[in-house]
Amino acid sequence: MAEIRVELTKNPKAKPTDESKLGFGSIFTDHMLIINYDEGQGWHDARIVPYGPLSLDPSASCLHYGQEVFEGMKAYRAQDGSIRLFRPEENFKRLNSSNERLSIPHIDEELLLESLKKLIEVEKDWVPHQDGTSLYIRPFIIATDARLGVHAGHHYIYAVILSPSGAYYASGLQPVKIYVENKYVRAVKGGMGYAKTGGNYAASLKAQEEAHELGYEQVLWLDGVERKYIEEVGAMNVFFVIGDEIVTPMLNGSILPGITRKSVIEMLKSWGYNVSERRISVDELVEAHKNGQFKEAFGTGTAAVISPIGELRYGDTVMVLNDNRIGEISQKLYDNLTGIQWGKQEDPFGWSVKVCE
Ligand code: PLP
Ligand code: COI
């Protein structure tokens, strides 16, 4: 394993004193991790340095053609005082899958995990204490070649920044209102939908703005071809409880293979629920709502955790779910998932990874 150099800041920042007001992703810690890639040398010079601006040539290709990927994960302060990650190897596997799609060179997953652990050890006092808070982790890679031709880069920066955070949605565990998007599309099969790359989020902003104007927090994407089948929400995968079946759209190349999604499926199966990964149309949801069979809906994601959906709007059809209250299955998943993440309960799946005491 390559050595990871550490340069500590001489000007540590004051840590937030009121952890109930952290919000999401706006406060950053004292240090960041950087690893460079240069053709011929590979990934090299892993280092932890004071947090600060990156220096880029104005022609850097990430700024023009969007060759970038990222990940989202969290470090939790567990009940026993230790600091833990949740299935971090899954995030690094997905980072390399995104790399592959964006023609970015593969990066050693062991180096990613070891260097992240080291960064978190340096920043462990930044992991917040209050219930529901965590240290959000944002690894990303950008192409830095200084030239305007459209080509895959020869030079990249991998960086990790950390942000003590509270709930992603201001409403916390209150049900969110979601707008079924029937004008814009996010991704199509053969595109980049399964990769975690900035372009997918840029494609979503306009739709999200218009949904906000109508009073909805996020949009639910439909497939880009028939505009019929459910894909995912802006920053989460989505599940529906219809009768005694729990359905989530199958991975089809245009949605993000969420790690929370995968964990929820494994948990529900271990409890004996009838879970299906299949194609599901918006018409099926409308029909199930009419028949009283549409019982619950929730989103899953690292930032969003388990986010109950209280209302879905499709055109003029408004579907209020479970009287706009958190459903039984959503609550059970939230309690068990966060129970494992915060070390409040047994971890029968071996998902929680201790970083330090
Ligand atoms: N879908 C999108 C578009 C996302 O941005 C996210 C968040 O990372 C997810 C799904 C959920 O993925 P995960 O559970 O791995 O955080
Ligand atoms: C996450 O859940 O980690 C995300 O990346 C979602 C969003 C903040 C883009």
Image: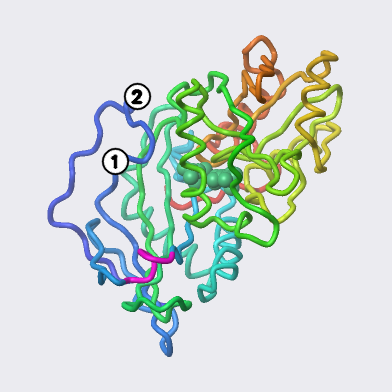
Check disc 1 and report its element: helix, strand or loop. Answer: loop
Image height check: is 341 above or below 287? Answer: below
Q: Position of residue 72 (x, y in %)?
A: 49, 49
Q: Give the mark toward the camera: 2 or 1.
A: 1
Classify residue 87 as left or right of residue 131. right
Is 357 covered by the magenta stretch? Answer: no
Which residue in the rendered view is the most extreme toward the left? Answer: 10
Asked whether 260 or 14 is in front, the reply is 260
Check disc 2 and report its element: helix, strand or loop. Answer: helix
Query: What secondary structure prevails in the magenta region?
Result: helix
Circle 2 is placed at which residue position? Answer: 20
- Residue 310 shows which numbered tag? none
Q: Position of residue 199 (x, y in %)?
A: 49, 55
Using the rendered view, name the quadrant where residue 323 is placed.
top right
Circle 1 is placed at which residue position? Answer: 27
Image height check: is 102 above or below 306? Answer: below
* Badge 2 amino acid: Ser
Classify residue 349 as left or right of residue 139. right
Looking at the image, which residue is at 55% across and 51% down? 353
Q: Is residue 186 visible?
A: yes
Q: CA distance from mark 2 to mark 1?
A: 13 Å
Using the rendered view, name the quadrant where residue 260 is placed.
top right
Looking at the image, which residue is at 82% across and 21% down? 288
* Badge 1 amino acid: Ile
Classify residue 202 as left or right of residue 29. right
Q: Position of residue 184 (x, y in %)?
A: 58, 41
Q: Is mark 2 within 8 Å of ligand 2?
A: no
Classify residue 315 as left or right of residue 209. right
Question: Magenta part of the protein: which range?
Answer: 60-65
Q: Earlier in the sequence, mark 2 or mark 1?
A: 2
